[in-house]
């Protein structure tokens, strides 16, 4: 008897110790880099620790519990996952705790396998997702999308569709970040499926997302998007659409642009202010000559001050390239043109960009044309200039280009008529002319020394 009590006391002591460490971590707002230290302190790899973390997750509220969940998702053994599955079915559980368990199981490697086994999948998954909804409500939408990108992006289109089906069956708008990613998928079976199903996600954000989406190449997807927009507009008129909470609307905060003119690169920072002064921002790298959106990264800054520090830091790190403040219209105009260019030239939109695009859902496009060139073409024949394909080397003079085919045609000096080798000749170009003049070395020297 005494022995059992002893071990219970030991367990209780250990539990309080871990609990205190987690609480301390949360209260001190420790940055995530400190997480490694915490993991060592609580001996995360121990079997007993994982069991205790599960206890803490189920008994606590708020951030301590979320931290326990985060730690658990990295270390849980199959045994812990099994007890979590058993707990999930316990009738005594509160909704919030049940949702947390469901999230844990979703994050846990081995339980995730359950989703992949096709037979039991749908029933189990549906029950599961129902619990999860309460959990997603508390999670940053960008993180919901990132879980999808990290854990599910490698699946084949067919497997993705079976999971998406289950997500759509909940009708929840929490999954919009995931839908945005797959709506722009290079697999038309996915983009068509999502475009079609979105008419059943009865939320104002669904409509905004669809209306702001760039014109895709695939006709069937475009038609499905138009149809879903029609259905959702009708639902809005009938008051069947859940509207955005006016108190929580994000508002445009600031935008910055940096340019690398000689390479046609642009970088755009687009930031919006959320309730409680958090700043959500995206950082998008653009190749305005050919590929459009190159990469994107989205994040959340605690407050205005830390956001401004991030911009300052970027300016210090990037040396010559400088971020300058621009107005909302210009930033939106650049992003919209860049995504249109990606699509026009047959590149698929970057998944992280499709995720961060939620910042643009309610930003109406600017009507003004800012005159910056998007999509480099050969100034003589109009062929699109590709940066990443081996079409031979095109010539670039600022925003003016000559394709390799047109270069080959240049065989004589335009001034004296003598034969030339294009690579060794001198090219003269003006932005307002659709022609590049090639002259030989001696004619070039004459222009340099007109008196001789
Ligand atoms: Zn050409
Ligand atoms: Zn000449």
Image: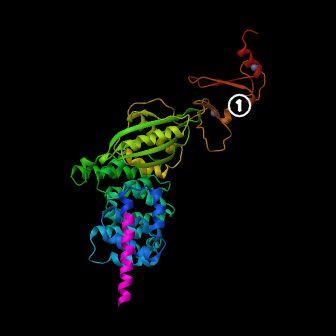
Q: Where does the magenta region start and end?
A: 1-22
Q: Is residue 415 magenta?
A: no
- Which residue is at 35% across, 85% downward? 5
Q: Quadrant of residue 6?
A: bottom left
Write the residue at 46% across / 38% down: 312
Location of residue 295 with respect to 134 vertically, above or below? above
Q: Residue 176: x and y, percent?
A: 37, 55
In the rendered structure, the answer to whether residue 450 lies left or right of residue 277 reads right
Residue placed under numbered mark 1 in the picture: 409
Instruction: Tell me the chief SS of the magenta region.
Output: helix
Quarter of the displayed picture in which ligand 2 can be seen: top right
Mark 1 falls on what kind of element?
helix
Residue 31 versus residue 342: which sits nearer the camera? 31
Q: Residue at x 71, y 16 (%)?
A: 448
| Spot occupied by residue 184 in the image (x, y as percentages of width and height) | 45, 52
Q: How is the image coloured?
A: rainbow
Residue in the foreground of this view, choosing between 269 and 231:
269
Q: Does the rendering let one see residue 176? A: yes
Using the rendered view, name the quadrant where residue 404 is placed.
top right
């Amino acid at each position: 008897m005494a022995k059992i009590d002893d071990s219970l006391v030991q367990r209780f002591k250990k539990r309080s110790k871990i609990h205190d460490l987690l609480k301390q971590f949360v209260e001190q707002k420790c940055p995530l880099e400190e997480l490694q230290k915490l993991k060592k302190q609580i001996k995360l790899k121990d079997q007993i620790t994982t069991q205790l973390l599960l206890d803490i997750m189920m008994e606590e509220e708020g951030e301590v519990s979320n931290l326990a969940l985060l730690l658990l998702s990295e270390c849980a053994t199959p045994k812990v996952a099994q007890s979590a599955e058993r707990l999930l079915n316990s009738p005594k559980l509160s909704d919030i705790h049940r949702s947390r368990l469901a999230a844990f199981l979703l994050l846990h490697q081995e339980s995730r396998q359950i989703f992949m086994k096709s037979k039991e999948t749908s029933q189990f998954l549906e029950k599961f997702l129902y619990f999860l909804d309460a959990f997603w409500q508390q999670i940053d939408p960008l993180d919901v999308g990132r879980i999808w990108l990290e854990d599910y992006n490698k699946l084949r289109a067919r497997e993705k569709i079976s999971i998406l089906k289950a997500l759509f069956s909940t009708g929840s708008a929490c999954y919009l970040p995931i839908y945005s990613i797959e709506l722009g998928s290079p697999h038309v079976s996915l983009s068509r499926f999502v475009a079609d199903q979105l008419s059943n996600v009865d939320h104002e954000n669904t409509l905004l997302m669809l209306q702001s989406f760039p014109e895709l190449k695939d006709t069937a997807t475009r038609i499905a998007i138009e149809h879903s927009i029609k259905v959702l507009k009708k639902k809005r008129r009938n008051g069947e659409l859940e509207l955005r909470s006016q108190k929580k609307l994000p508002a445009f905060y600031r935008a910055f642009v940096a340019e690398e003119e000689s390479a046609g690169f642009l970088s755009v920072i687009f930031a919006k202010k959320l309730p409680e002064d958090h700043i959500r921002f995206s950082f998008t790298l653009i190749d305005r000559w050919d590929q459009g959106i190159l990469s994107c990264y989205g994040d959340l800054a605690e407050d205005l001050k830390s956001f401004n520090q991030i911009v300052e830091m970027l300016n210090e790190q990037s040396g010559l390239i400088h971020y300058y403040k621009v107005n909302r219209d210009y930033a939106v105009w650049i992003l919209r043109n860049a995504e249109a260019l990606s699509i026009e030239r047959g590149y698929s939109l970057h998944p992280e960009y499709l995720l961060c695009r939620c910042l643009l859902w309610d930003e109406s496009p600017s009507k003004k044309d800012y005159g910056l060139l998007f999509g480099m073409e050969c100034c003589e024949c109009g062929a699109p200039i590709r940066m990443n394909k081996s079409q031979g080397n095109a010539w670039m003079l600022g925003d003016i280009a000559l394709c390799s085919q047109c270069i080959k045609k240049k065989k004589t000096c335009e001034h004296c008529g003598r034969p030339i080798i294009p690579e060794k000749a001198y090219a003269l170009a003006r932005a307002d002319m659709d022609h590049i003049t090639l002259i030989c070395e001696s004619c070039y020297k004459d222009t340099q020394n007109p008196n001789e």
